[in-house]
Amino acid sequence: VQLVESGGGLVQPGGSLRLSCVADGIRFSIFVLGWYRQAPGKQRELVASITDGGITDYADSVKGRFTISRDDALNTAYLQMDSLKPEDTAVYYCLASYTRASLSDMNGYWGQGTQVIVSS
């Protein structure tokens, strides 16, 4: 099983990035997918999730700015990040879990992470 994130980088405040997470070795369509992030010195936090049925949920800190989506035909999850702020700076990880509860418990298949830096 392998999950590979991409799309991170350096962006100015107010800018946008789109992260991708490509999965291999799992029946992607049945998994709940989530994007976590971890800033230096902070705990890893769940910022967005999407169920196999397409129901989405967001942390209050990103609601209205981030959009999670999935393309099961491509085994890919996305995180569109708009109106980025310096406090969004973190390593972003995707997680594929069997249930929403498992996702919240950080149980499942992890990617290696992609760095996002928001700075002028």
Image: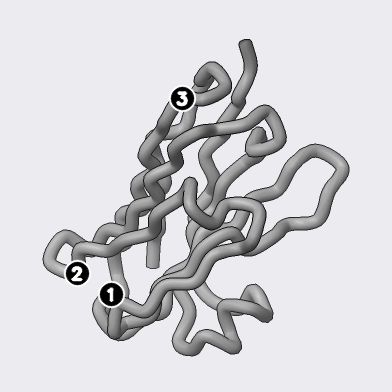
Q: Is residue 13 above or below residue 67?
A: above
* Badge 2 density bin: few <14, some 14–19, many ≥20, Cα 10 Å: some
**Tag 1 residue:** 28
**Tag 3 residue:** 15
Determine the residue positioned at 52% across, 85% down: 100
Determine the residue positioned at 36% across, 39% down: 18
Q: How far apart in space, not on screen, are marks 2 and 3 (Cα)?
A: 27 Å
Q: How far apart in space, not on screen, are marks 1 and 2 (Cα)?
A: 6 Å
Amino acid type, residue under disc 2 in the picture: Asp
Amino acid type, residue under disc 3 in the picture: Gly
Q: Hey, which quadrant is residue 81 in on the image?
A: top left
* Badge 1 density bin: few <14, some 14–19, many ≥20, Cα 10 Å: many
Q: How is the image coloured?
A: one colour
Q: Is residue 24 above or below residue 99?
A: above
Say if residue 98 shows up in the picture: yes
Residue 8 place in picture, x, y as percent: 46, 32
The answer to whether marks 1 and 2 mark residues whose Cβ atoms lie closer than 8 Å is: yes
Sequence order check, earlier mark of 1 and 2: 1
**Tag 2 residue:** 72
Sequence order check, earlier mark of 3 and 1: 3
Sequence order check, earlier mark of 2 and 3: 3
Q: Nearer the viewer, mark 3 or mark 1?
A: 3
Say if residue 110 shows up in the picture: no
Determine the residue positioned at 31% across, 82% down: 52
Q: Which residue is situated farthest in the top direction here?
A: 120
Residue 80 place in picture, x, y as percent: 38, 45
